[in-house]
Amino acid sequence: MNTKPSPASKPNITDTAEKVVAAKAPAKKAVSADKPVVKRGVKTTTGPITKAVAKPVVKAAAKPKAEKAVKVKKAKLVRDSFTIPKPEYLVLDELKLRAVKLAQPAKKTELLRAGIKALAAMSDASLLAALKTVPAIKTGRPAKD
């Protein structure tokens, strides 16, 4: 038996391609008789037609592709509030003045963060000793006077 398909049963490649192109092409809108047809991209001028002068194209030297810098994600910030005794709060102002004298102005938040780093770097024994020097205070908002 012959297993080749007959030429009549073969699909015509050009017919299939035309169908694909026709399916992708947008449908044309019907033009009403009262509106003139204006083609886009075609300029109509009443003056003399001038030819565009071709300028020589200067190609820039091929630049080596620079490596993209890896962006460092910023740490998420957390807002918090706390209660601190007035004398210890005044120490923050004194530390700010010291930082200015050392030509390194600092904000209160920077001082607190530096203190946290210093506490984190301490050994367990020295951290415990520092915590014992700080008296416990009542938490929450102070009573209205």
Image (spheres, rainbow, N blue to C red):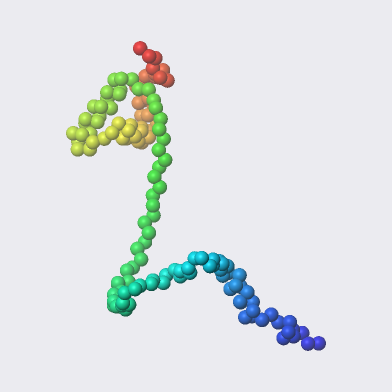
Percent of width and height locating residue 96: 24, 31
Viewer-closest of 25 and 72: 25
- Residue found farthest to the top: 145
Q: Judge from the rendering whether residue 7 lies leftward or rightward of residue 41; answer left or right.
A: right
Residue closest to the eye, 81 or 7: 7
Q: Residue furthest bottom?
A: 2
Q: Is residue 39 left or right of residue 67?
A: right
Q: Residue at x 30, y 31 (%)?
A: 108
> Where is residue 127 shown, x and y percent of the image?
37, 29
Residue 46: image location, x then y, percent = 34, 73
Using the rendered view, name the quadrant where residue 47 is placed.
Answer: bottom left
Dividing the image into 4 quarters, which one contains the C terminus?
Answer: top left
Residue 124, quarter of picture:
top left
| Foreground of the two, 72 or 30 | 30
Q: Does residue 103 lie above or below 5 as drawn?
A: above
Residue at the spot x=64%, y=79% of the render?
15
87 in relation to 102, above or below: above
